[in-house]
Image (spheres, rainbow, N blue to C red):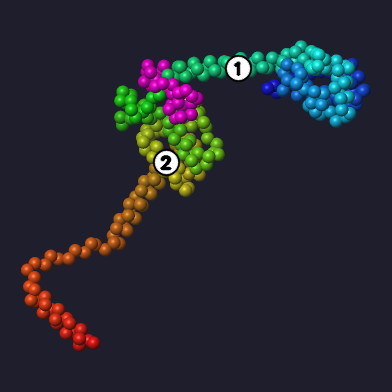
Amino acid sequence: MNKDFRISVMLPTHPKVVKLMRLLGDRCFYNLIRLWAFVAANKPKGDLADMDIDDIEIASDWQGEAGKFVAALVQFSFLERDKNSLFVHDWAEHNAYAYHAPERNKRAKKAAAVKHRDKRASAKSDIEHSGKPDLAVLKVQNGYAPSPSPSPSPSPNTDKAASTDAPGGESVLDRNPALLCELLRRRILENDEHAKVPVTFTAKSGWYVAARLLLDRDKRDFAEARRLIDWAASNPFWKSNILSMPTFREKYTQLLLRMKGDGEEVEKQRKKESARQPPDWKPEKVENVNPEKVQAALKAAKANIGRID
């Protein structure tokens, strides 16, 4: 849809405009501009074939006598008739850019489709030949790429031949910053589905750069970072404060100490509760019991009970 159109600086003093204003009043100049704006946005070819006189005057915001504005536009050749329809006079000549908007949109969509197809093909080729993860492939793996997904989609858990250049034997794919960004994004959305978080993570985006520096420069363990994101997202205080990857990297040490402290506190509480419980009582093993002595003891007990009564 067009967002603007051309108007000559000589329009206000053009004889046709002057005559139109003498006939209908000064406000009809506004109505004319209003009509052209509607045409540029909704009828870029200038053809009003599917609009009747009432529709045209509503689009022009004409508030005078019905039919009078359109009749005047035809009279002064602002509009022309083609059998039973109307069209704007010389619209293609005076507003060529607006006139060719549909063709531009069609070319733009075609170019975007070609660019997207080439990008997907390049991403697939990159992962097949070099074994290195590409962001476009990671988008497919994370579940927000357009369908159909490229085949095969790489899986960090099933590819035994994955590169193990990363510390601790982790594959490069497991340590990819985009995956860490996606995990944090999903945890934030679980707490607030309307949170303003990125949908994708380009190599130069703030989230991606922060995650890359966290893993490569700060030498943080990927599995530990994932656990810390899960912990922060479930913590009543930190889930409302860790809302971006740069903030997560900045507060990483503080978060890690707090998570470990909570773990130690839980263990202390468990030991404390365990200490409060009485030890299990086990009766001593009795051997060589004399039945006669037992009977005598019972009789003595009954005799004592009788004295008490």
For residue 251, which quarter of the picture? top left
Instruction: Left or right? Give the position of 216 relative to 53.
Output: left
Residue drawn at (77%, 22%) of the image? 51
Q: Residues within 10 Å of mark 1 (few under 14, many from 20)?
A: few
Q: Secondary structure at mark 2?
A: helix
- Residue 112 within the segment the image draws in magenta: no
Query: Label 2 is placed on what type of residue?
Result: Asp
Query: Label 1 is placed on what type of residue?
Result: Ala
Q: How many marks?
A: 2
Q: Report x, y in % for residue 223.
A: 36, 36
Query: From the image, which quarter does the C terminus lie in?
Result: bottom left
Q: Residues within 10 Å of mark 2 (few under 14, many from 20)?
A: some
Residue drawn at (79%, 17%) of the image? 85
Q: Which of the pair 256/294 is nearer the observer? A: 294
Q: Secondary structure at mark 1?
A: helix
Over which residues does the magenta segment extend?
125-152
For residue 124, which quarter of the picture? top left
Residue 266 visible at all:
yes
Q: Is residue 308 above or below residue 249?
A: below
Disc sitting over residue 74 in the figure: none
- Residue 148 within the segment the image draws in magenta: yes
Pointer 1: what residue? 108
Which badge, 1 or 2, comes first in the chain's sequence? 1
Q: Of all residues shown, which one is farthest toward the top?
A: 93
Instruction: Left or right? Give the position of 292 relative to 192.
Output: left
Q: Report x, y in % for residue 86.
A: 80, 17
* In contact (CB < 8 Å): disc 1 and disc 2: no
Disc sitting over residue 230 in the figure: 2
Residue drawn at (50%, 39%) of the image? 189
